[in-house]
Image (cartoon, rainbow, N blue to C red):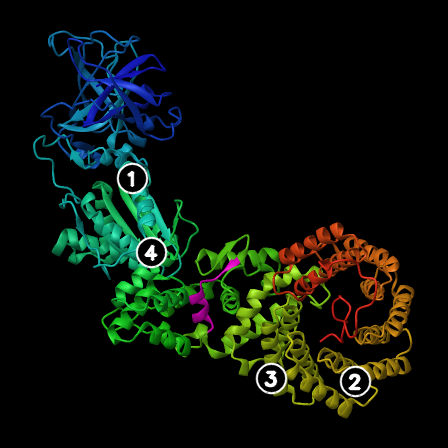
Amino acid sequence: MEVWNPVGKCSGTGYLVADRLVLTAFHNVVGCGRLEVRGLDPEGGAEWVAAEVLWPEVAPDLAREPQADAALVRIAEASWLPPVGGEPVRWGRIDGEVSRASTDSQLPCLAVGFPRSETRDGVRDTKEIRGHIETLTGLKSGGLISAYVDRVAVPSKPDERSRWAGASGAALFARGRLVAVVTTDRQRDYDADQLTAVSVVSLAARPGFAMAAKAAGSDLILEDVTAADPEQPPRTAYDVEVRRGVNNLPELSSPIFVGRAEAMAELERALAEDSQTITQTVHGLGGVGKTTLALHYAHDHAGAYRLVWWIRADTPELVEAGFAALTVRLRGGEASDLTTAQAAEWAVGWLQTHPGWLLVFDNAEKPEYVHAWTGQLRASGRHLITSRYKRGWVCDPIALPVLDDEASLALLLRLVGGGDEDEARALTNELGHLPLALEQAGAFIAQTEITIAEYRAMLRQHPERATDAAPGGSDPGRTVARIWRITLDVLQERDSRAVDILRIAAWYAPTGIPRDLFAPRAEDPVDLAQLLGLLADYNMITLDKAGIGVHRLVQTVARTPSEDDPHREQARITAARDQAAMLMFGELPDDPFVNVAGWPTWRALLPHVEALLDAGDPAEDTAEIELILTEAGKFLAEQGQLSRAADYFSRSLATVTRVFGEDHADTLVSRSNLAYVYAAAGDLERAVPLYERTLADRERLLGEDHPHTLGARNNLAGVYESVGDLERAVPLYERTLADRERLLGEDHPDTLASRSNLAYVYATAGDLERAVPLYERTLADRERLLGEDHPHTLASRSDLAVAYRWAADLERAVPLCERVLADRVRLLGEDHPDTLVSRSNLAVAYRWAGDGERALALYEQALADCLRVLGEDHPTTKLVRDNVSLVLEDGPRTTAPPAPAPPATAPPPQTAP
């Protein structure tokens, strides 16, 4: 074939080694991706057709590597028809050792090329170059061959001699085998007697050459060429041929294969014939289906390879045994005298000389287990590797995720032969869409003929046995619990702290776990990053900007005790739960009632708090768990999630009662907390008895005058007011104020709170003449003691403004409401709950003052902000919504409402639970 380089404006020689593949010298095509070629036609009638450089992908440095001066060109023209009746190319290898051992010192060789030309068209003659290779001196280091020219002639004029110039890129043949590509002569265009060529052996060792040739239909099978016997080259140690498709593939464990179309397509693209990929790794969590994917690929494509060989790669010994088994398959009884190491080495040699195979290294625990072998075999075939480890591979590995929802459901239902779809969907969620877990569960359900619902119950009640139960006829070692134990063994050996972190993370939500939670478990941030990176490398966790993720079934197994698994001893699991509680409590922001700045952190941590509490047995709650219950209950109560808050406070009370006893101070606080949330939820039938008991216990244990007793009396007064029992509420508030003035002084914060509470109950009773002066005094005292901008000062100013409004003193109510709103926007921000209440209060004041237009606009803004920031169920949202009737009333208010209408503000502060 003649090759035309439109960039260099010169032609060279090539040889058609397959229907659409031309072998030539790289310097003939350098600088151009697209070029033209045409076949031999002495009359000049052959048409040029479009072609493109297929290999190499990266231009070599020929000055540094002259043995890289070769290229494969693919004919891209659709109309191209290859010559009819051509023989397949036979590739040859000049074996120096065999040649030097023979009696003949010269090996005849032949090349045919076109003369170099600076024009694209015209009649071309060809040059036939005959010569020989000195078997003692012609084979150079680095893959070059020197050939001596004996005769150069034009084939149509065999008796004429000619210069050989123009044959660079010609195929050099010996004994009918293509052994090299001609690149240069010693003296260029002058009469010369020696050529330089790049051997096919050296090209076969270069990445991608053999694969590109195979993809085009030319298997690179190297035959030995010697000077001794031109007809029957001697048999070599590796001269064993196999029919295409030979394999040792295990049987597919199940014909059901769903949800992997995308992953299979990616794998097929990576290992396609026209791909330059040599090694492809698939990584993922144990049980995610890496082996199944590789096995389906190997079965589906076995016919496309000369040989497909499956090698277990758990340990270096298993890898070596896998190669030795290949030798036994190929040589049979001849291999009986070889050691395992010798047999493995022979297999490598055979693979190097018989390209076009696929090796599957299954479950490679470490990259180094296979790199020692794949490094020797880069030029001859493909490698498919499956591993739980994702770092250190020579390729861009394919990450295999769990199945999606629909694929999980389809797999489970087909395994069990149908069933309740809702129950099946719930089970797939509980198993985290992990293929092995689904197969394990489906086979167990089908074999034992139980329902999906019954299996779910087993999983909840007996997670240890359910995750380790292999159905009859299956591999007992392939259960989720046992597979992950292997990975934990490796992690324990590398750094036991990584396993500790995994056990702790098992108690949190499966996604979005903040990395900072684990900072106390590491020496510094770098150490923590390395520990988390180690877990991620083995696919036991995922890492992203949102934090850490752990598969939910990994979590279930990690926190379920097992006598047979040292990683899941009861003591270790208990210690991990306690550590999870301690680390979580250390991250919770203080005082969720008033610390609004901490609310975003609370919202981020709440899923993990809930997971920790849900995963533990309430009967085993510790003091640290009780602290988390209390703080979480406070936050939930403040956010309006009163039912969940009541659940946590109730569990907290049960825990402190069990741990500390009925009369412990923490028990009394917990009982008060539960009463508080019952009251906030309107469940006064349960709130009142709890408050009454708490007050009685504090009086009995602490005395009438103890500050905690006064706080309990204040709380009881508040709940009496909530049920409308003002006859008991007012005296209790009055007594509490008097006692605090006597015991704590006029200026104590609790005294000021009692005075504000008493003003509130007077207003509730319609006694504004006594309520307003108390509010005015409280505001003045707080301004004097706490300053103009303290939150308690702002609360007193808001209470006084609303009291003025109810007293029909709108000239003082409106400016005061405006000031409160401005101060809260400035100090707390636009979205603080107190700011939203102030905006609603000002809207009511405007309406009562006759400015309905401003009132409605301000109220709509307040309600929209409440819904956006706090949600539908937050107490502040409900309070603002309750003000709608006040905003929409016809006509301004001019008189006070009838008793006992309360002011339209938030409830008065009680002793914080």
Earlier residue among tags 3 and 4? 4
Please identify the quarter of the rendering in which residue 36 is found: top left
Earlier residue among tags 1 and 3? 1
* Marks 3, 4: nearer the viewer: 3
Please identify the quarter of the rendering in which residue 152 is found: top left
Q: Where's the N terminus, which quadrant?
A: top left
Please give the residue where the numbered disc 3 appears in the rendered image: 654
Numbered label attached to residue 290: 4
Mark 2 vs mark 4, CA separation in Å: 74 Å
Q: Where does the image place residue 408, in percent across and percent down from the top left? A: 34, 60
Q: Check disc 3 and give the amino acid type.
A: Ala
Label 4 environment density (alpha carbons within 10 Å; few <14, some 14–19, many ≥20): many
Q: Are marks 1 and 3 in contact (CB under 8 Å)?
A: no
Segment colored magenta: 548-559
Label 1 environment density (alpha carbons within 10 Å; few <14, some 14–19, many ≥20): many
Determine whether, in the image, residue 488 is placed left or right of residue 271: right
Mark 1 vs mark 3, CA separation in Å: 70 Å
Q: Check disc 1 and give the amino acid type.
A: Ala
Q: Nearer the viewer, residue 854 or 383?
A: 854
Query: Vertical placement of 341 versus 140: above or below?
Result: below
